[in-house]
Structures are given as structure tokens and as C-alpha cells.
Image (tube, rainbow, N blue to C red):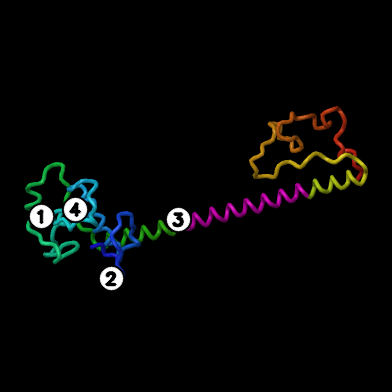
Amino acid sequence: MAHKGSYKTAKAYSEGDGPSAYTSLSAYNKMMSYSEVVKQLRGPDFDPSQNPIDPEALMISGGGKSHGTLAMCDGFVPITETLSQIKSRQTSSAPVIRQRARPVDLAIEAALMKEREATRLLLEERDRNTQRLLEEERARNNAHVKAMHDFVAAMCEKQGLPPPPPMPSPVGTHHSRVESHDPFTSPGESPSNPATNGDGASPPFLGIRF
């Protein structure tokens, strides 16, 4: 019924399966068309996998018999009405009788699906590369800031000066700085005059002799 492989490897029908689970795009379209029509006829909770094939839904979803052949399950489902007889008793709320997809239409749809999938993979790869480059740049910047801080700290210690202020939070962390964007202002502190350390004196590292 589901055209999901040979009788030895076929899997049970699952409504969530995509085209890749079927032997062809044509088989997928036929099954989806039947599933939609039979639910319109028998209710949204109707499960095609737990009920016998519905002859009326099969005729409507496949456009009746083409050259005496059903769209699927031909020869396995007894058909007692012609498509004209079904149409004659349909109401305005009845499912629309569908036309079978032509091979050329299926080929175009398959090509479009393949192109969309290729585009999706390219976009995912681009996003991964962009993220990797951003992380590498962030790591280089953080390493540079740390190296500068360690250098200043070593010079302060060598000359007997107080150590420099703590390092600013690494780029990319969630720690925020004050609105002044002063890299030497810890979170929660008020920004001070850049020429002083808050008490009117020059910051220790400004007095270092290089």
C-alpha cells in the first residue's frame, strides 16, 4: 500500500514520513493524496494504516481509473462505482476529484526538492563556518588582552607598583560592563576619570617606565 520498498523490506505506513521513505516521488504523492482525501471523507482521526483501503477515496484521490488502472492498489481493491457515479452524488463539501500528476510534473518537483535540499545544506555549512570563524577571532582577541594584562602585571611587580585592575570580562561572555564601556571598570562600579583611578591619583600602570 505505501510503496515503501519490496515486500521483504517495506516499512509500515507513517503519516510523518517524507518522500525519502518511499520508492519514488510518485508513490509518495499518491499516498499523501489518498491520506488527505480519506480523512476528508471519514474524519480527521481516520488512520489509513489501521483501516482497509477506502474505494471511494482511492477513486477520488487518483482521478478514477486511467486506462482501466487505479493509481495504486490496482487489482487488490474492489471498485463498485465509476468516477462519474461518485461525482453525481457528491455535495459541495465533498473532496475535490484530483488529477494524477504527470511524469514531467513529478520530475520538476523532484528537481526542485533536490535543489532546495542542496541549498539548505550549503546554508548550514556557511553558518557553521561563520560561527567557527567568530569563535576563533574571539579566542585571539581574548588571548591578546590577557597577554597585555600579564605584561603590565609583570612590569608592576618588577617596579614595586600595585597590580593593575582585573582583566575585563572575555569577549563573548554574558558579563556586562557599565555604560561607559570602560574596559577597566568592573561590573557594578561607576566609571571613573580615565586619567585617575577614582581617588584623583593616576592609575598604577601609567607610571610604569618601559
Indicate which disc residue 98 carries. 4
- First in sequence, mark 4 or 2: give its number: 2
Rounded to the nearest whole Å, what is the CA distance between mark 2 and mark 1?
30 Å
Residue 101 position (above or below residue 90): below
Three-letter code for the amino acid on which mark 4 is drawn: Arg
- Frontmost of labels 2 and 3 is 2
Q: How crowded is mark 3: few (under 14 residues within 10 Å), some or many (20 or more)?
A: few
Rounded to the nearest whole Å, what is the CA distance between mark 4 and mark 3?
31 Å
Q: Nearer the viewer, residue 210 or 149?
A: 149
- First in sequence, mark 4 or 1: give its number: 1
Query: Predominant secondary structure in magenta?
Result: helix
- First in sequence, mark 4 or 3: give its number: 4
Disc 3 marks which residue? 120
Q: Report x, y in % for residue 115.
A: 40, 59
Q: Report x, y in % for residue 21.
A: 33, 62
Residue at x 10% of width, y 60% of height:
79
Three-letter code for the amino acid on which mark 2 is drawn: Ser
Disc 2 marks which residue? 6
- First in sequence, mark 2 or 1: give its number: 2
Indicate which disc residue 65 carries. none
Disc 1 marks which residue? 83
Image side of residue 124 versus residue 5, left or right: right
Examine the image and state in which quarter residue 9 appears.
Answer: bottom left
